[in-house]
Image: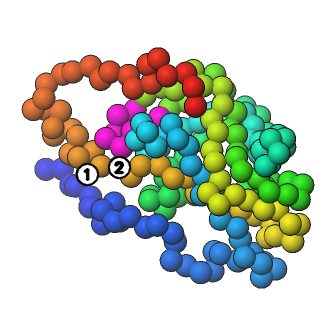
Amino acid sequence: MKKTRFYPTVWQAMTFPSGVVGQWDNSGRRIKEMILKNDMATELGISEMELNLIKITAFDEAGNEHHILDFPGQNPLPIRGWASGHFLRSRSVVNLPEGSYATLRFYLGGKNNRFTYSDGVTEAANEFDHLDFTIENGLTVEGNEAAEVKLWFDFAPYKLSKRFKGLTDLFKGTQKPRPRLANSFGN
């Protein structure tokens, strides 16, 4: 008989970590938190992305692009929604010139990009060369910020039916999933 492990944290959604210790840097400055949104991800109900990033840039309110970080030849980076409790930390965002920023642009490599939808279906997303994420409430860099920033992503949470997908697929039979990204080449 096979043992089934039960993880109770799968069933609850933690919006932010409850520990206050992780919200301050070594100098006592509060770590900035940015919530990033993408309209296409919201419309399609994307819950997770695996992106082969090349570089990240930021656009200020005047529309000028500022380089943040390069990713030289690495494996795809998994990005999950904030409901899962996962975030990315970056020390490069605070090195931007002083000013206000509205958008982060993620430049993608031509392969190994994948979207996972809220119902658990995974689809390749290699036709995009970049994805734009708007910063909720913007980002203002004044020069006296903490040394790092937390990047949270506003994606759709997984549906409960995803947990029982294997069981429901037995009853449905074999079906080919239709690609959701067909004929959508914009952001």
* Three-letter amino acid code of the residue under disc 1: Leu
Q: How many residues crowd mark 1 within 10 Å: few (<14), some (14–19), many (20+)? A: few
Q: Is residue 28 covered in magenta?
A: no
Distance of mark 1 from mark 2, alpha carbons? 7 Å
Residue 178 appears in the rendering? yes
Q: Nearer the viewer, residue 92 or 45?
A: 45
Q: Which residue is at a point 18% across and 22% down the rendered structure image?
A: 174
* Three-letter amino acid code of the residue under disc 2: Tyr
Residue 184: image tag: none
Position above or below: 13 against 22: above
Q: Nearer the viewer, residue 2 or 107?
A: 107
Position above or below: 47 against 187: below
Q: Which residue is at a point 71% across and 50% down the rendered structure image?
A: 102
Residue tagged 1: 160
Count of picture labels: 2
Q: Which residue is at a point 39% across and 52% down the rendered structure image?
A: 157
Image coordinates of residue 65 in percent, x first then y, are 82, 40
Q: Which residue is at a point 77% across and 82% down the rendered structure image?
A: 28
Position above or below: 126 against 39: above
Q: Is residue 119 covered in magenta?
A: yes
Image coordinates of residue 88 in percent, x first then y, are 63, 55
User: Residues at badges 1 and 2 in contact (C-beta under 8 Å)?
Assistant: yes
Q: At numbered mark 1, what does the secondary structure look like: helix, strand or loop?
A: helix
User: Where does the magenta region start and end?
Assistant: 115-122
Q: Is residue 99 left or right of residue 41?
A: right
Q: At numbered mark 2, what does the secondary structure look like: helix, strand or loop?
A: loop
Residue 68 appears in the rendering? no
Position above or below: 101 against 169: below
Residue tagged 2: 158
